[in-house]
Image: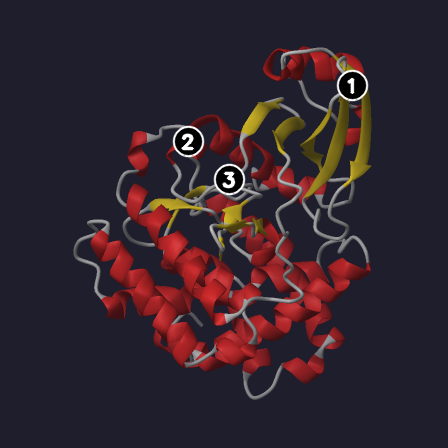
Amino acid sequence: MAISLQHAGEFTVALANELLAQRLGEAITAVQVTPLGEGVGLMSSIGRAALTLASGKETSVVLKVIAQTENVSISKQLNFYANEIDFYRHLSPLCPIRSPECYFADIDPETQDFLLILEDLGAAAAGDQLKGCDEALMLQGFEKAAQLHGRFWGKTDQYPWLRYQNIPEVNQFRQDVVFRPGVAPTLAAFPEYFTGDLAEVVTQIGENFVSIFERAMAGTQTVIHGDYRIDNMLLPVVDGEIEIVAVDWQNTTGGRGPHDIAYFSSQSCGPEMRGAPEMDALRRYHEILMDEGVKDYSFDQCLEDFRVNLMITMITPIAIIGTMDSGNERGVELGRVILERGLSSLAAMDCGSLLKELKLG
C-alpha cells in the first residue's frame, strides 16, 4: 500500500520514524512542519519538517504533497505527481543537473496522492522568478539543459516507464481546458502588454495549440525537465560560483530538448535578454549538444525548434492569469511578470511570422 499524504501537516513523529529513522541513525522525537515558499507551490504543496532527534540534534527535510488549491485536478490530469516520483526513483542519479537527494518517494497509482521527502538545502539561495536572472545565469541555464538533453538524446526508449509530452489526449486537454479558456481573461487583464499583433498571435496559438505542440515536440526525443525556470532552481555558491540545483521535476518526460530552454528564456529572462544574449546562449546550447555526441541536428533546426517551443510555453502565464487559481498575491504577480517576458520573447523571435509559415490556421 502506498504511503501518501493529503497535507504536509499529516507528517507525524510515527511516520517520520518509519521512513527516516534508519537513515538518520536514531529515533525522531518531535516534528514541526511549516509551509515553504509562499506563492511558488502552485501545483504542489511544499513544507519544511524540522526534526528533533533522540540525541537532541536537530535537522530538517523538505516535504512535497498534492496542491492545496483547485490546481490539484489539473496536476493529476497532466501526471505531474507521477512524473516527479518516477524522476527521483529512476533518473536523478543519472541526471547531469544536480537535484536534492531523495529520501523517500511514493504515490498511490489510483488517486495520485503522494509523498516526497527531499534533502533540505535551506542554506542555498532559492531562485526568484520575479527577480529573474543575469546573463551569466542565463548562459549556465542553457548549458545545464544541454548537458541533460545530450545525455539522454535518442535514448528515451531505454526507460519504458517514461511518459512523453506529446500525448494526443493530454494535448487536447492543454488546449481546451488550460490554454484556450485563459486567453480572453488574460487579454482583458493586461491589454497593455499585447502590442502589435501579439493578441492575434496568442489567440491563434490557443486555437491551434494541439498542432503547434505536436510540431514543437517532433523529432528525436530526450529527457526534459518540462518546468525549467528560476523558481524551480536553488542557487548555492560552490567554490565561489553559483551552481544551479534543479527542483520541481513534475513535468519531467520525454520531449524535444529546446522546450526547456525556450521555457527558461521566456519565463525567467527579462526583455533586456532578447537579442544577442539569447542568441549567444542558444548557440552555446547547440555547441554542447554537439560535444555530447548529438548528430544531424543543425543550428538552424535548433533555432526553429526554439521559436516553436516559445509559442507553447505561453500556456504557463495564460494558465496562471486566466485559468488556474494563482494561489496568492505572489502568484498573481508571477503571472504578470512571465506574461510580459513571454510576449517579449515571441516578438523578439518573430514567432508571428513563423506561425504563418506553419500554416495552421
- Mark 2 highlights which residue? 93
- List x then y, in percent, for residue 113: 67, 27
Q: Nearer the viewer, mark 3 or mark 1?
A: 1
Please indicate whether residue 24 sits to the left or right of residue 168 in the image.
Answer: right
At x 43%, y 28%, the residue is 90
Which residue occupies the foreground of this view, 8 or 139?
139
- Mark 3 highlights which residue? 99
Look at the numbered disc 1 and give the secondary structure of its residue: loop
Of the image marks 3 and 1, the number of the one nearer the N terminus: 1
Q: Check whether the beta carbons of the residues at disc 3 and disc 2 lie within 8 A of each other.
A: no
- List x then y, in percent, for residue 255: 39, 48
Q: Check whether the beta carbons of the residues at disc 2 and disc 1 lie within 8 A of each other.
A: no
Q: Quadrant of residue 15?
A: top right
Category of crowding for the residue at label 1, using alpha-carbon neighbours closer than 10 angstroms: few (below 14), some (14–19), many (at least 20): few
- List x then y, in percent, for residue 107: 61, 24
- List x then y, in percent, for residue 49: 75, 30
Residue 56: image tag: 1
Of the image marks 2 and 1, the number of the one nearer the N terminus: 1
Please indicate whether residue 76 sits to the left or right of residue 304 in the image.
Answer: right
> What is the CA distance from the residue labelled 2 to the residue labelled 1?
32 Å
Please indicate whether residue 316 sits to the left or right of residue 65 in the image.
Answer: left
> What is the CA distance from the residue labelled 3 to the residue labelled 1?
29 Å
Which residue occupies the foreground of this view, 63 or 84?
63
Of the image marks 3 and 2, the number of the one nearer the N terminus: 2
